[in-house]
Amino acid sequence: MRVVSFVVHCSLYCFNRYIRPFIMGWKDVFPTPWTPIIFITYVMLFVNMGLLVTTSKNKDGTFPYNATTVVMLTEFTKLIICLATYVYQGNSVMSWFGTFKEHNKVFLLYFIPAGLYALYNNLSYFNLQLFDPTTYTVLLQLKIPLTAIVYQFFFDLKLSWIQYFAVIILTLGCSVQTLSKSHGNTRPLYSPDEVSLTFKMMMITVQVSCSVIAGIYNEKLLKGKQDFSAPVMVQNSFMYFHSVVINMLVLLFTGKLGAAMEWDNVRDVITNHTVVGIIINNAILGVCVSLFLKYLNSILKCFASAMEIFMTAFLAWLFFHVAFTLETALASLLVSVAIVLYFQYPPVVKESAPPPEEKDVTK
């Protein structure tokens, strides 16, 4: 009887200490029935993207298509989805053009996150010449704690020490996972003597900052009120319009626009079912990200991205026979601990509630 009593008391203690706070925290993290669906959809689309890209590769690891063409077609597809959704809600195509004038302040402001994302994408190629892939990927995990820090300034929110601890564990988990990705030639293009460490760290800091500020700034616009508010799909169309224009200008400046728009390259893409799947998946993912930022927040997005790491590793092991390493197992454990801690004591963001007047503005 004493053993049974001891087990019962331990079970009650564990329930009250860990499981109950987790359940209560779940309600704060996901305030509406739709928010966990958005969360799960985001993770699954991200995982699916990795699997599709892996499937589309040749046996030697190269792509049988022009990756730049895929990026451009994806951005155009995002814009088409936003327009189609806008029309489906009972609006006309001409009135969509009128929203550019009606919400001109928001339209102009979206140039900032679109420009920061474009700078981030271009710096990724440059920084991969300065760092080996493993070091580069580990340093990119700095965006997790930086997101937690910057987010507090944009939304007047203060994280507790437990929430900071969860963020640190999450960062460690993501960093550990990258240790199992070092294969083949991992030497950077430039030797350590050619480029100073200060310059390299400055460039990686700029790249990470672009990603963090763009995401949080985008969330701020999506949750905007009064003069800076607009329907979600209208704001998405602003974002993707700027993104298409900026990317085309970058390609034009670098001399790659002609090759990206060549019919042969476009044909190779649209006739490859897997690549078409990548475009559609990434386009839907882009829209899902906006809903995630609208009704959830950027910090939770870091946790969702971390879940994608070990889910992708597991599915890659299942379908492509990629080894499930000790580093992946350790990373999965750390990420799981971080998620439990975060869900027990989540920061409540008041701006995450959707404004009631949005439906009227759309129509």
Image (cartoon, rainbow, N blue to C red):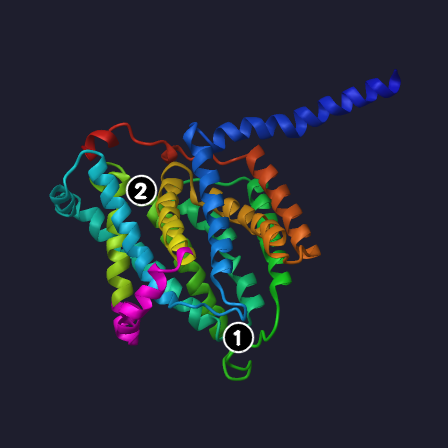
Q: What predominant SS class does the magenta segment belong to? A: helix
- Residue type pointed to by label 1: Leu
**N-terminal-most mark, 1 or 2:** 1
The crowding category of the residue bearing disc 1, from other C-alpha atoms within 10 Å (few below 14, some 14 to 19, many at least 20), is few
Q: Position of residue 268 (x, y in %)?
A: 35, 65
The crowding category of the residue bearing disc 2, from other C-alpha atoms within 10 Å (few below 14, some 14 to 19, many at least 20), is many
Residue at numbered disc 2: 222
The stretch in magenta equals: 249-273
Give whichever of 106, 62 is nearer the camera. 62
Magenta stretch encompasses residue 242: no
Give whichever of 37, 159 is nearer the camera. 37
Magenta stretch encompasses residue 269: yes
x 55%, y 84%: residue: 193
> With 347 as the anchor, is 273 left or right in this view?
left
Q: Position of residue 263 (x, y in %)?
A: 27, 68
The numbered mark at residue 197 is 1
> With 199 as the anchor, is 138 left or right in this view?
right
x 37%, y 68%: residue: 66
Residue 137, can we see it? yes
Q: Position of residue 238 (x, y in %)?
A: 24, 50
